[in-house]
């Protein structure tokens, strides 16, 4: 019997992503339920739902790659104005799908990046580029100038996400820019390793600088 929405929430609470992936292989409605849980960015469960969709898509694609492409196309449609949908988490979800299915879906990365002009989608696009870049920097190399422009944003969430994403994308050309942000104590919500945390822009910059310059940098 497929899990109810509340049962999925309980599984997300304990980060049982493998269990959710197994359920989704047998019942596509699980993905729809996860999408419905993904909109509240102040909620850790919502971020875990986004991550779970990507992992579930990886399992589904092993036997039904067409289903994964259909899910991705649906999300792209949601991002278009004419869809009438609420696409607030579509870039993040698409980023997770691409990240977990690079062979099948890497062609979607430029489409995700091109949505950065939409204010409502901007933070999600930046985060998605970082997540994709973590597993394949070549796939998002063209997006470095786009993401780099946001480290100067007065919106500290955009700034912090851009700093982190550039590190995941291996953008060594931004080292000098990041040095100036070491002392920025602005705090943002940041999802990392299954947990929703508070991090300062300065801490993110320091972490990225260490990654880009090497473990013995100061």
Image (tube, rainbow, N blue to C red):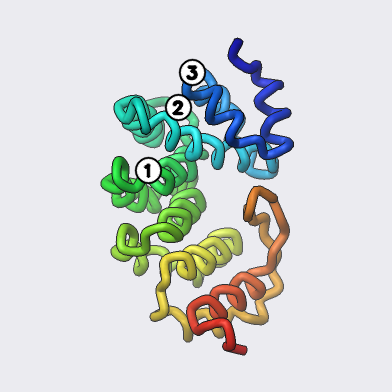
Compared with residue 79, is residue 120 higher up or lower down, i.e. above or below?
Answer: below
Residue with the mark numbered 2: 85
Disc nearest the viewer among 1 and 2: 1
| Earlier-in-chain disc, 3 versus 2 | 3
Report the residue marked by disc 3.
26
Which residue is most to the left? Answer: 107
In the picture provided, is 78 more to the left or to the right than 193?
left
Q: What element carries label 3?
A: helix
Q: Are marks 3 and 2 in contact (CB under 8 Å)?
A: no
- Alpha-carbon span between mark 1 and mark 2: 25 Å
Residue at image mark 1: 101
Mark 1, Cα crowd under 10 Å, few <14 / some 14-19 / many 20+, is many
* Image quadrant occupied by the N terminus: top right
Q: What element carries label 2?
A: loop
Q: Are marks 1 and 2 in contact (CB under 8 Å)?
A: no
CA separation, marks 1 and 3?
19 Å
Q: In which quarter of the image is the C terminus?
A: bottom right
User: SS for tag 1?
Assistant: loop
Instruction: State whether residue 76 is above or below residue 95.
Output: above
- Report the disc number at residue 142: none
Mark 3 or mark 2, whichever is nearer to me: 3
Q: Nearest the camera: 176 or 118?
A: 176
Residue located at (64% from left, 56% from top) = 190
Instruction: Kindly indicate the quadrant of the structure image that contains residue 209.
Output: bottom right
Nearer the N terminus, badge 1 or badge 3? 3
């Amino acid at each position: 019997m497929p899990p109810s929405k509340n049962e999925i929430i309980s599984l997300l609470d304990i980060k049982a992503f493998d269990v959710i992936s197994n359920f989704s292989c047998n019942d596509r409605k699980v993905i729809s339920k996860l999408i419905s849980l993904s909109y509240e960015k102040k909620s850790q469960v919502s971020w875990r739902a986004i991550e779970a969709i990507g992992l579930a898509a990886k399992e589904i694609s092993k036997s039904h790659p067409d289903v994964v492409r259909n899910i991705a196309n649906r999300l792209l449609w949601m991002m278009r104005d004419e869809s009438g949908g609420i696409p607030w988490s579509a870039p993040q979800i698409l980023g997770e799908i691409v990240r977990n299915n690079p062979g099948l879906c890497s062609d979607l990365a430029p489409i995700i990046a091109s949505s950065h002009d939409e204010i409502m989608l901007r933070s999600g696009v930046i985060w998605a580029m970082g997540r994709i870049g973590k597993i394949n920097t070549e796939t998002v190399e063209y997006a470095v100038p786009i993401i780099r422009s946001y480290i100067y944003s007065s919106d500290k969430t955009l700034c912090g996400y851009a700093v982190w994403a550039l590190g995941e994308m291996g953008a060594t050309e931004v080292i000098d820019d990041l040095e100036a942000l070491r002392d920025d104590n602005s705090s943002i919500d940041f999802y990392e390793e299954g947990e929703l945390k508070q991090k300062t822009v300065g801490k993110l910059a320091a972490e990225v600088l260490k990654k880009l310059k090497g473990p013995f940098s100061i």
